[in-house]
Image: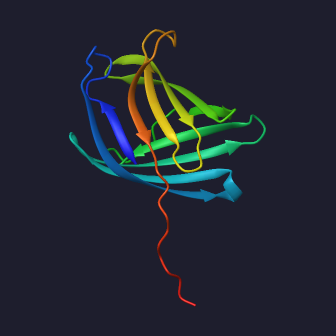
Amino acid sequence: MHSRRLLHPLTGSNEWVEFDGTAIDKRIWDGRAQIEEFETESPTGHIEGMTVRIYDAKSRQWSIYWANHSDGRFSLPATVGQFENGRGEFYDQEDYKGKNIFVRYTWTSSLDSPRWEQAFSTDGGRTWETNWVWTLSRMKDNTTKAR
């Protein structure tokens, strides 16, 4: 995974850092849920986290829960949304440095190289500042299974 992150979101800064990391995903419940382990060494320090995604067939929406190793708990509320025409949009409302903001995750699906973006809005979703972008590449499993 290649990551590009805005160092100081919501300050007017345009200073980005780039780094690589690993995201390992495991599908469960016949694809209706997914667990992801994320780890990287960024210029601002070690980041390790876990995402749990759960699909609600009635609403046709996903709920996304993120946990960071530094605080050991899921961020709430869930980020909720759905995919349409190969693009996923997911939203929540959070406290960020004392400000109540909207958060948007955008997934552009591609079998071999999906792209994820996180953006913040301080004006109720009228404008968005993208602050983190992942470009993922599928790695081949080169392990040999014993017969």
Q: Residue furthest bottom?
A: 147
The residue depicted at 46 percent of the width and 32 percent of the height is: 117
Q: Is residue 51 visible?
A: yes
- Expressed as whole percent of the image width and height from the top left, the position of residue 88 reads 61, 33
Q: Nearer the viewer, residue 49 or 99?
A: 49
Relative side of 92 to 1, left or right: right
Quarter location, residue 68: top left
Colour scheme of the rendered structure:
rainbow
Residue 102: % across, % down: 48, 20
Q: Quadrant of residue 78?
A: top right
Q: Is residue 58 shown left or right of residue 46?
A: right
> Quick check: 41 above or below 98?
below
Q: x and y percent of residue 86 in the render?
A: 65, 36
Which quadrant does the C terminus fall into? bottom right
Q: Give the x, y percent position of residue 99.
A: 37, 16
Above or below: residue 75 compared with residue 145: above
Residue shown at 58% from the left, 44% from the top:
110
Do we see residue 78 in this rendering?
A: no
Residue 11, located in which quarter of the rendered image? Answer: top left
